[in-house]
Amino acid sequence: MKIDELLREELIFLDLAASDKMEVINYLAGKMSADEGVVDCERLLSDIIQREEDIPTGLENGAAIPHARSVGVSRLVMSFARLKDGVDFGAQDGQPARLIFQFGVPPTQISSYLKMLAKLSRLLKKRDLRTELLQAKTPSEVVNAFSGQ
């Protein structure tokens, strides 16, 4: 499961202005609704919000991965936002998140779900990758940052 194959340029948003994590989650879910893999956007949004309320998805070093297993999607669907200013996603290090990967996966694809979480968590620990994502000027540069990863 390669992230550069899952990320679609039309679902990558650079320098998004947002005041809190719910604004980011709502925005990305709305944009994800255009993807054919999203069969019920309201359900996907509800599931992501519920997951976020249960356990915040903020990671260390300014990243977050709001996500959910949801019947609102027919396959794994992912979006990315780089925020102008970070927002609190409840990271243990207290840092606001600027790099947001949001995804939904069908409930039956538990293996894909766990693999994606583990892979993103591992990759986002790499300073060079985070720097590349923070400096990307275009969505294609974001996708290319994951080439070979």
Image (spheres, helix red, strand yellow):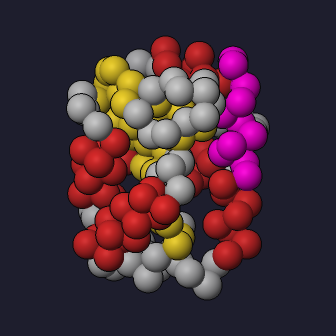
x%, y% of residue 119? Answer: 72, 48
Residue drawn at x 71%, y 30% as measured from the top left: 125
x%, y% of residue 114? Answer: 70, 64
Q: Is residue 93 visible?
A: yes
Residue drawn at x 32%, y 21% as measured from the top left: 84
Check the image and report above or below for 5 versus 107: above
x%, y% of residue 28? Answer: 32, 50
Check the image and report above or below for 40 versus 141: below
In this rendering, the count of numbered labels is 0
From the viewer's side, name the closer residue of 144 and 59.
59
**In this picture, residue 126 sits left or right of residue 101:** right
**In this picture, residue 24 sits left or right of residue 137:** left
Q: Please check the rendered image and state whether residue 33 is part of the magenta-colored stretch, yes or no.
A: no
Q: Is residue 8 visible?
A: no
Which region shows up in magenta? 118-128
For the C terminus, the quadrant is top right
Which of the 4 image quadrants contains residue 137? top left
x%, y% of residue 143? Answer: 54, 37
Residue drawn at x 25%, y 44% as measured from the top left: 23
For the N terminus, the quadrant is bottom right
From the viewer's side, name the closer residue of 85 and 55.
55
